[in-house]
Image (cartoon, rainbow, N blue to C red):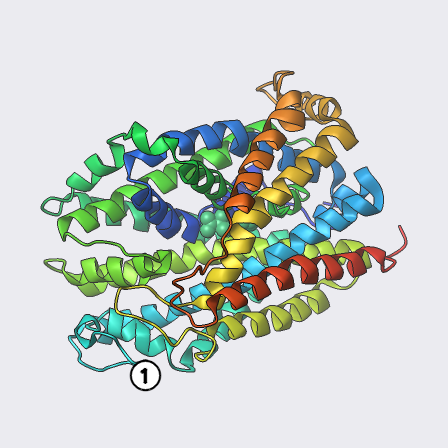
Amino acid sequence: MSAEETNGRGQWKSTLGFILAASGSAIGLGNIVFFPARAYEFGGGAFYLPYFIALFLVGIPIMILEFGLGHQTRKAFPLALGTIAGKPGEFGGWWAILNATVITMYYVTILAWVVGMLFGSLGQLWEPTTDLPAFEPVNPSVYENPGGFFYNMLSSYKALLFVLFVWVANAAIVWRGARSIESAVRIFVPLMWLFMIILIIRGLTLENGSHGVMFLFNPNFEVMKDIKVWQGAFSQIFFTLSLGFGIMCAYASYLPKRSDVTNNALMTSCMNCGFEYIAGLAIFSLLFAFALVPQASTLSMMFFVVPKGIANFPAGAEFFGILFFVLLLLAGLSSSVSLVEAITSSIIDKFGAKRSTVVVAVTILGCVGSMFFAIPTVIDKGLNATGTVGLTLLDLMDHWVFYYGLMMAGLMQCLIIGWGYGAKKLRENINKRSKFRLPSWIDWQWKLVIPIILAAILIYSAVDEKGMYGANSPVEFGKALSWTCFFVWIVGIAIIAAVLTLIPGKKE
Ligand code: TRP
């Protein structure tokens, strides 16, 4: 393939390579832990309807939009939006990419803890221990393994080493762009499916395991009156499909010209939600078999509740434990590389810098950020025995970026592309090469329906916002910290985005 043909930016070797990469990005911690945690929080079956409505109404159309944008402009997000809407568009693109950078930082931190647990799974994790963590436990009896092991790791500086390890792995995978990513996902993605299927079979064949399935499918229409369920469903769809921050735009910019965008978007969405669905079955069967109750934080699901269930398996706890954490690591890595690639390609496209230099710079910067989330003193000392991990900083940044950043970015791109570029033009271009022809009403979905829905949820959430930590905050200065994070997020990111937009880029 000549450099000219690929625009000098590299290209996926095959459609399959692209689908594997895009679904590898989509399938991640969001599918295996955040989804079951959300579904549990909102009453199991009650979550499904809002979830599917969000998928069809917003998820799939935005996936097509992002794929279409990358495929047509052949540029990463900031410059792609810049070609449509000039400097304001480019600013929006950088704003989204910087939000993605924050997610990347703490996503890698969580993956680093997964690596720590994986090491633990090789033995120690399943042994009974009375070893108490460095934090002062409210109720020491709660700290049996695997919870005790996790707390010990959190409160040690070893976690920083694991952060370094995960960043080096990310850098190695994005080192040669689409080519090296494709090689990695060809191995990672099939393995993820295999491991998940093994876990499901184990879960469903546990005594009472199938009760979990009932919980997931038993609808409860009462809960749907609660707008929080809808807010949860929409943000989950954005997160799980890797939408909003231009990640899919960057991946689609490496597609050959003759690609069927609609078909690829449908396949990626279906594979992702299919995986999420079966992950839900595996996790819930385990919870019901051992009468485990997931508590407050999402991370407690992945670091205590599920491992506790696995520790209770009649046989092979070590085997299944390793399987679970390797699965999390593979799924997480194939997602984090998409974030790193989106950041890297945005910088390369704008400044024309050498890929290797940019990868090294992004890795160093990201690594410092991820380490900051993992420093034991930054993690809340008020860790308590309810299973709530007091990850104050991580929770707070997650709150702003996850609930607001994703949907704000989604809203922005619908408006810029729908009105600026022209929904009709985008649709007609996509339809030229797609077997399934997009109907004309999708124009209005992009231009009006989705923006109205997203704006409504955002406005409702903002009005209802009390900060993450209200009056009875478990953290002393919780409220102040919450608002500080808010200002750092909203002002800090805007300033950096403005600077990046205004610096002149390479000459075309
Ligand atoms: N989709 C991934 C998951 O489910 C996470 C992820 C990767 C993501 N890239 C993203 C989330 C971009 C938001 C935006 O774990």
Residue furthest out toward the front: 471
Tell me which residue sits at (17%, 78%) in the image. 129
Q: Position of residue 263 (x, y in %)?
A: 55, 28
Residue 4 visible in image: no
State left or right for residue 257 relative to residue 300.
right
Residue furthest out toward the top: 440
State left or right for residue 213 relative to residue 41.
left
Circle 1: element type:
loop
Residue 57 visible in image: yes
Tell me which residue sits at (77%, 53%) in the image. 349
**Mark 1 residue CB less than 8 A from any atom of ligand 1:** no
- Count the marks: 1
Q: Nearer the viewer, residue 253 or 156?
A: 156
Q: Residue 306, located in which quarter of the rendered image? A: bottom left
Tell me which residue sits at (58%, 74%) in the image. 368
- Amino acid type assigned to the residue bearing label 1 in the image: Ala
Q: Nearer the viewer, residue 272 or 476?
A: 476
Q: Which residue is mark 1?
A: 134
State left or right for residue 447 relative to residue 26.
right
- 143 above or below 330? below
Q: Residue 259, located in which quarter of the rendered image? A: top right
Tell me which residue sits at (36%, 52%) in the image. 33
Residue furthest out toward the right: 507
Q: Position of residue 504 (x, y in %)?
A: 88, 58
Q: Quadrant of the N terminus?
A: top right
| Crowd band around label 1 with a 10 angstrom C-alpha radius: few (<14), some (14–19), many (20+) | some
Q: Position of residue 453 (x, y in %)?
A: 56, 31
Q: Position of residue 216 (x, y in %)?
A: 26, 37
